[in-house]
Amino acid sequence: MPNRLKKFWKSLGPGLITGASDDDPSGIVSYSIAGAKYGYSTLWTMIFILPLMVVIQEMCARIGLSSSCGLAGNIKRHYSKLLLVFISTLIIVSNIFNIGADVYGMAAGIELLLPGSTKIWSFLIVFFMIGLIIKLPYRRIVGIFKWLAISLLAYVLAGVMFITDWPSVLAGTLIPSFDGRYEYLLVIMAIFGTTISPYLAFWQASEEAEEERIKRDNTDGRFVCEFKTVTKNELRRAMEDTKYGMVFSNLVGFFIIALTGSVLFSAGINNIETVKDAAEALRPLAGEYAYLLFTLGLISSGLLAIPILAGSSAYVLAEIFNWEASLDRPFSKAKEFYIVIVIATAFGLIMPYLGIGPIKALFWTAIIHAIVAPFLIITLIHMANNPAIVGPNVSKKSSNYVAYATFIIMLLIAIAFIIAEMPFPEEAKAVIYSVFPR
């Protein structure tokens, strides 16, 4: 590997890993449904969402780096306990539901490649991954996460190999298409909800704090939550890493939509509910390589996202209760932190035995994300402009404007989603469907 490429690879960290973890199995479901049901007409969302994602995640990086502390710790120190309990509880619960949905998705990928019980394979693989996280030092864990992230380029490769109508792909990307039908609006809301996920904010802030503590050789695994001077180079590195990560995330999402749109939508296969449906439908239409790439990307995404979902929950609780919490600390020094990771993962794994299927898990995850996202975004804006947290590294005015726009969009999506799922009298439904026909 040339020196310049090595230097670039080394500079990538929390931003790349956070961005890649956004393309988890539940996200792949949303993107695949969008492509199969509406072809290229939802591709514009990947371009539209990108600056919103970049600004929100840059704020998280700025907060974590400047305060050497994650979001929960800063909320605890500078804001009300009610806000802390409200956001933290919803994040932890939604993460567990998300883990459950991702386990189903990864199990579906394993089932397509390996014989035997998919549930047993899922248990073995996930707990092997958790074991590595507990056993290995931080830098080794980051290395594994980065390679898992890069493996998601399988979707880009599959797209390059099997997408044929590139002029239509370009038109769908650059020219927004609006369909007034109710189902189309739900798909757009699902794309926004799965792309701007609250757990990403918590994970990135905590990992930036982790990086900073290790760099300062802080052997105490507790978060300090007070401003530390950060050099311009450190801040620039974090912002660039975040941009690369969000571009990578949306590039993968873009190619999943484009691939399923090119192959499934074009063949009239519009109704898929799971990633297994998408992979099996691709096989006879696009061939063995497309099927294999899609499936391998699915398994990699689960291996990356599940530990991060569990880890973000562990960071939240550790910051609230002032536990030692560091992926660089041995189990004996950060027992509570690692036990939360194991318990959160275990709850997700046992969902099949509790009668909570993948669609139900995704449904509850989406509802909780819809509720918490606006509250979290407005809190992030305040935190990223609070000198007590970030010192002189306050967010730029242009970033604040984009963040406020993101808040309004996510608030409207939350309201629309909640209204869509509320039981209405038939007369009210008739009025809704006259404006947004089914």
Image (tube, rainbow, N blue to C red):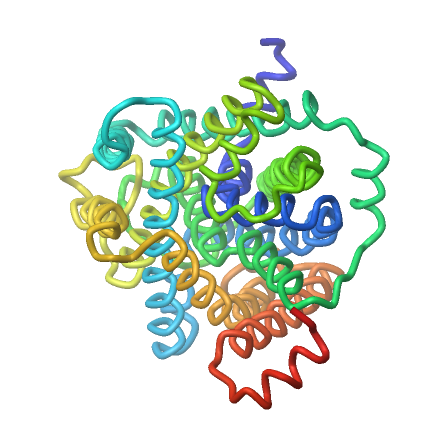
Using the image as rendered, state which of residue 284 and residue 392 is in the foreground: 284
Q: Is residue 380 left or right of residue 358?
A: right
Vertical placement of residue 178 versus 165, above or below: below
Q: Residue at x 52, y 89 (%)?
A: 425
Whether residue 295 is situated above or below residue 432 in the rendered picture: above
Between 305 and 355, the residue placed more toward the observer is 355
Q: Which is more toward the observer, 162 or 417?
A: 162
Judge whether residue 268 can be spotted in this image: yes
The structure residue drawn at horizontal position 52% and vertical position 49%, both measured from the top left corner, is 229
**Residue sitting farthest toward the top:** 1
Q: Residue furthest left?
A: 332
Q: Residue at x 70, y 59 (%)?
A: 399
Task: State the image coordinates of residue 243 (x, y, percent, origin top left).
Answer: 65, 42
Location of the N terminus by quadrant is top right
The residue lying at 60 percent from left, 67 percent from top is 410
**In terms of image quadrants, where is residue 255?**
top right
User: Where the C terminus falls, by quadrant?
Assistant: bottom right
